[in-house]
Image: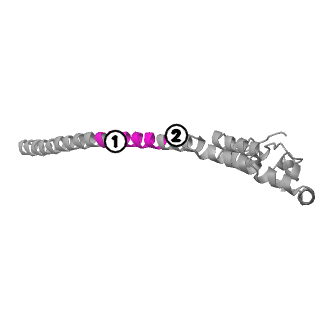
Amino acid sequence: MKRDAAPLACLTAYDATTQTGSPLTGDPLALEVQERLFDALDTPVSGGAIGSLFSLGLSTDPTSGQLSLNADTLSGLLASDPEDVQSLLGGSTGIGDAFQTVTDNLLQSGGPFSSATASANGMLNDLKAQYDQTSDRIATQMDTYRQQFTALDAAMAQMNSLSTYLTQQLSGQG
């Protein structure tokens, strides 16, 4: 069965016409989760007449990724082979076990979600450190400007005083 990006298309798509991406465009974790879940959905089960969920009447729309179920197919199999349906869904090698394994692997310590969380936290810490360094640099520069302004203000006051003195001296000699 062909795999496509349709199930997460609304979150991972890129619109070339408007040159805009969705929130998870290019996100490797989203694509990995999609692939692993599809693999679990498509897990073949041996030992019974029903080999996969798709044999139960499950199908996916290739454009939207929407799952649908043919109720007639499922009803027919439930009537004719209820043990095989049960084995497919809940047996030790069934779809339920495959989904449990996928979710355990995705959520385990050191798995994709914890790695992505650690990476995001590391990036956040780096950004905070950069922000703190920039804030410190700005504060230091502001202190330097204040000192320069104070010195300039004192020099201007001295110049104004000298100007007033010279104006008085020149006025008196005229």
Give 19 or 145, whichever is nearer the viewer: 19
Residue where numbered disc 1 is placed: 138
Residue 107 lies, in percent from the top left, at 59, 46
Camera-side mark, 2 or 1: 2
Give 49 or 39, whichever is nearer the viewer: 49
The image quarter containing residue 105 is top right
Query: Circles 2 and 1: CB distance less than 8 Å?
Result: no
The crowding category of the residue bearing disc 1, from other C-alpha atoms within 10 Å (few below 14, some 14 to 19, many at least 20), is few
The image quarter containing residue 129 is top left
Residue 64 lies, in percent from the top left, at 80, 50
Magenta-highlighted stretch: main secondary structure? Answer: helix
171 to the left or right of 58: left
Residue where numbered disc 2 is placed: 119
What secondary structure is found at the residue carrying circle 1? helix
The crowding category of the residue bearing disc 2, from other C-alpha atoms within 10 Å (few below 14, some 14 to 19, many at least 20), is few
Residue, x 32% and y 41% (percent of image)? 136
**As shown in the figure, which amino acid type bears the numbered disc 2?**
Ser
Q: Which colour scheme is used?
A: one colour
Question: Which region of the structure is painted magenta?
Answer: 123-140
Residue 127 in view in this figure: yes
Q: Quadrant of the N terminus?
A: top right
Q: Please report whichever mark, 2 or 1, sits nearer to the chain's N-terminal start.
A: 2
Give 141 or 3, whichever is nearer the viewer: 3
Rendered position, 66 above or below 102: below
